[in-house]
Image (tube, rainbow, N blue to C red):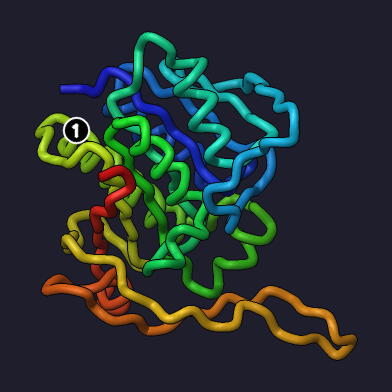
Amino acid sequence: MKLRRVLISNDDGISSPFLNRFLEAFAEVADEVLAVVPAQEQSWIGRAFSRHKTLTLSPQNSPLKNAKIFALDGTPCDCVNIALGHLCEGEMPDAVVSGINIGQNLGLPLLWSSGTFSAAAEGAGWGIASFAASLQLANEYYEICRLSHQMPPEKLDKILAAACRHCADFVREKVKQGNFRIGNAININYPSEYAEGAEFVKCEPASVKLLPFYKRNPDGKFSFKYAIDSGVSRGGLPTDIECLAQNKACYSEICVRP
């Protein structure tokens, strides 16, 4: 059985080379797909809103009959808030799904820096089943996809397509079962070598210690450089960091609205 409507967003923007694959997968499991994504990349922007800016929503050409696509010159949270408050008025989606992100999203409190996860948190705040999905990237694909936004090579495209299909099926089954807590956002991570039928486990976000995110340049200025602690478990489940290190796809439930 298909979902009625799914709202898709992301933080990699309308030019993300992962977006079309994600839309294709959800078009197979939902009668209607509505995508509202940032006009420009908005990674690492967290729960930001464009309070002091007037926003423009621009319709985009859709290659899919049952998908409507819009670009918004705002943040991921702007996208979800405007979609739910204006485009979905009177007919809310069955699920809000953010992704599939170019790169992993792991650990607390780092997750709250992610535009991908924050878009899902916005949906959860409205009481809608909400999911964030991310695909870990091998170093060889980082510059191609993350920095240049080029289409993924054949090997990565197969991994991407498998992760997108799994995510769409997981969201459909989770929503249909109804066994999720309203106000929780589900964070999903796929390993860089993900394959159809690979192990998929429930985990918890690792509790990570924050590290310096900036390196000092010779001129005394600072440039961003990603760093993450190995993290520790806060309970009995494996952590998201441990799962990806073992090439396991994983998901965790994070309370957004008690």
**Which residue is more in the foreground, 185 or 177?**
185
Q: Quadrant of residue 201?
A: bottom left
Q: Residue at x 48, y 37 (%)?
A: 9
Farthest residue, direction right: 219
In the image, residue 173 sits, relative to residue 234, either above or below, namely above
Q: Is residue 45 left or right of residue 110?
A: right
The residue that label 1 is drawn on is: 175
Q: Secondary structure at mark 1?
A: helix
Q: Residue at x 33, y 75 (%)?
A: 207
In x, y percent, where is residue 34?
45, 23
Q: Where the C terminus falls, by quadrant?
A: top left
Q: Is residue 209 left or right of residue 82?
A: left
Q: Is residue 135 left or right of residue 48?
A: left
Total marks shown come to: 1
| x and y percentages locating residue 48 in the rendered image | 59, 46
Residue 211 in view, yes or no: yes
Q: Is residue 14 visible?
A: no
Location of residue 12 in the rendering, given as x and y in whole percent from the top left corner:
58, 48
**Left or right of 115: which side holds 175?**
left
Residue 39 percent across, percent down from the top left: 67, 36
Q: Residue at x 85, y 86 (%)?
A: 220
Residue 109, by quadrant, is bottom left
Residue drawn 11% across the image and 74% down it:
236
Circle 1: residue type: Val
